[in-house]
Image (cartoon, helix red, strand yellow):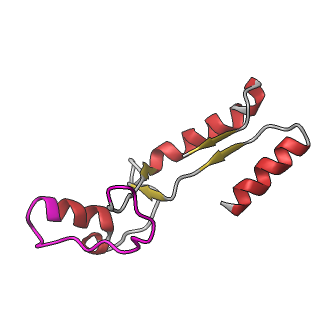
């Protein structure tokens, strides 16, 4: 957040444009299976969440709940890994379009 504030201050001071992408949890795999690493799916969050929903495991442990929403539940945002490159390309085009600086959660 501090880095974002620095960027926004710099942009305002020098009359520039910027796009800040805020995504934290990329999920998914390469559609062709060419990229990425093989991991133990029984230990990663999304497969475990699906297993809990299907009743294959008794519960799902969620860690890191320091930042809570008003309903007092953990918020987790995910972006599909194949969407990330398109987001970056769109972000690169954004300043050229003459739009104002954007922060995209």
**The residue positioned farthest toward the front in the image shown:** 70
Rendered image quadrant of residue 58: bottom left
Instruction: Please indicate whether residue 32 sits to the left or right of residue 100 in the image.
Output: left
Residue at image x 32%, y 70%? 44
**The residue positioned farthest toward the left in the image shown:** 55
Give the position of the N terminus as an image quadrant: bottom right
Instruction: Please indicate whether residue 71 sits to the left or right of residue 48 in the image.
Output: right
Badge count:
0
**The residue positioned farthest toward the right in the image shown:** 14
Q: Main secondary structure of the magenta part?
A: loop
Instruction: Please indicate whether residue 21 sits to the left or right of residue 77 in the image.
Output: right
Q: Is residue 67 magenta?
A: yes
**The residue positioned farthest toward the top in the image shown:** 97
Task: Locate residue 71, reporting x and y percent.
Answer: 32, 56
Q: Is residue 42 magenta?
A: no
Task: Locate residue 14, reporting x and y percent.
Answer: 91, 42
Residue at image x 62%, y 34%? 90
Question: Image height check: is 69 above or below 17?
Answer: below
Residue at image x 70%, y 38%? 92
* Relative depth, front residue between 19 and 38: 19
Question: Image height check: is 38 above or below 12?
Answer: below
* Relative depth, front residue between 19 and 12: 12
Rendered image quadrant of residue 48: bottom left
Q: Which residues are magenta?
A: 52-71
Task: Locate residue 53, reporting x and y percent.
Answer: 14, 59
Residue at image x 35%, y 62%? 74
* Relative depth, front residue between 34 and 11: 11
Task: Locate residue 61, reporting x and y percent.
Answer: 26, 74
């Amino acid at each position: 957040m501090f880095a974002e504030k620095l960027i926004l201050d710099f942009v305002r001071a020098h009359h520039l444009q910027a796009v800040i992408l805020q995504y934290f949890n990329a999920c998914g795999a390469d559609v062709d299976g060419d990229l990425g690493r093989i991991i133990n799916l029984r230990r990663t969050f999304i497969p475990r969440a699906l297993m809990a929903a299907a009743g294959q495991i008794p519960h799902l442990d969620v860690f890191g709940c320091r930042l809570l929403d008003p309903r007092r539940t953990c918020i987790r945002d995910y972006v599909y890994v194949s969407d990330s490159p398109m987001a970056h390309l769109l972000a690169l085009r954004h300043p050229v379009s003459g739009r104002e600086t954007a922060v995209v959660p």
